[in-house]
Image (cartoon, rainbow, N blue to C red):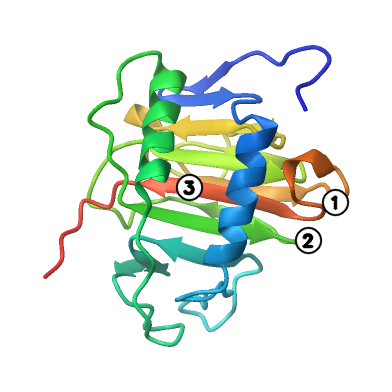
Amino acid sequence: MSALIPRPRTVVAPGAVHVPDWLTAAEQRHLVAECRGWATGPVPMRAAQLPTGHRMSVQTVCLGWHWKPYSYSRTADDAGGGRVAPLPDWLVELGRRAVGDAYGESAAGYTPDAALINFYDAAKMGMHQDKEERSDAPVVSLSIGDTCTFRFGNTDTRTKPYTDVELLSGDLFVFGGESRFAYHGVPKVLPGTSDPDCGLTTGRLNITLRVTGLVDT
């Protein structure tokens, strides 16, 4: 699934690193199979409702902590009230390896406790910050399926300056440090660009791992 001409690892902004072709085809297929299971429950995949009343165009399912705009909880109070599925240890280890590979240093202390799995099917994501967490630990983003344009901006505004990065199936994007709270979004997904070898024939899966900094009360 790798490109004929390898794409270089790129530092998009301080603390924001794009690592192309990071996931192998086998790892992608495994993640797709797991995501299909997570999407069925105990809290099913759904389009989250914004405070405005509008539904997001992406479908989301969560592990560890349930996210709804703009807060976390252990139970999905906006989707039936079930308790969210736990974040498996192997996915924590994958996130730890991702941070280590992106930054070229040990990530032994990186322990994500939440995952948001978004499915894009002709969907977009507006510019936003990931700021519901009480931690500034890096966010790990994995792409599987259709290619997308990922717009990575600045910490002050949704507008320019920003950089558009093409994310292909298997790509890793990590943002932390100075860029942890940068605005980012997905203005475009390119239908029909998914390699069937990834296990997904249509649409795009985005798996993000986060450290919430939250504790049960």
What's the residue type where badge 1 is placed? Pro
Compared across the picture, whether 17 is left or right of 139 comes to right
Where does residue 211 sit, x and y in percent of width and height?
30, 46
The answer to whether any part of residue 196 appears in the image is yes
Kindly report the distance in space between the C-alpha atoms of the residues bearing marks 3 and 2. 19 Å
Question: Which residue is labeled 2 in the image?
Answer: 122
Q: Is residue 13 above or below residue 110?
A: above
Where does residue 81 sit, x and y in percent of width and height?
37, 85
Kindly report the distance in space between the C-alpha atoms of the residues bearing marks 1 and 3. 21 Å
Say how many tags the image has. Answer: 3
Where does residue 108 sit, x and y in percent of width and height?
26, 26
Q: Residue at x 46, y 76 (%)?
A: 43
**Rendered-image quadrant of the N terminus:** top right
The nearer-to-camera label among 3 and 2 is 3
Question: Which residue is labeled 3 in the image?
Answer: 208
Question: Which residue is labeled 1 in the image?
Answer: 191
Q: Residue at x 74, y 13 (%)?
A: 6
Q: Is residue 130 above or below residue 193?
A: below
Q: Are marks 2 and 1 in contact (CB under 8 Å)?
A: yes
**Dot 1 lies on which element?**
loop
Dot placed on the residue nearer the N-terminal end, 3 or 2: 2
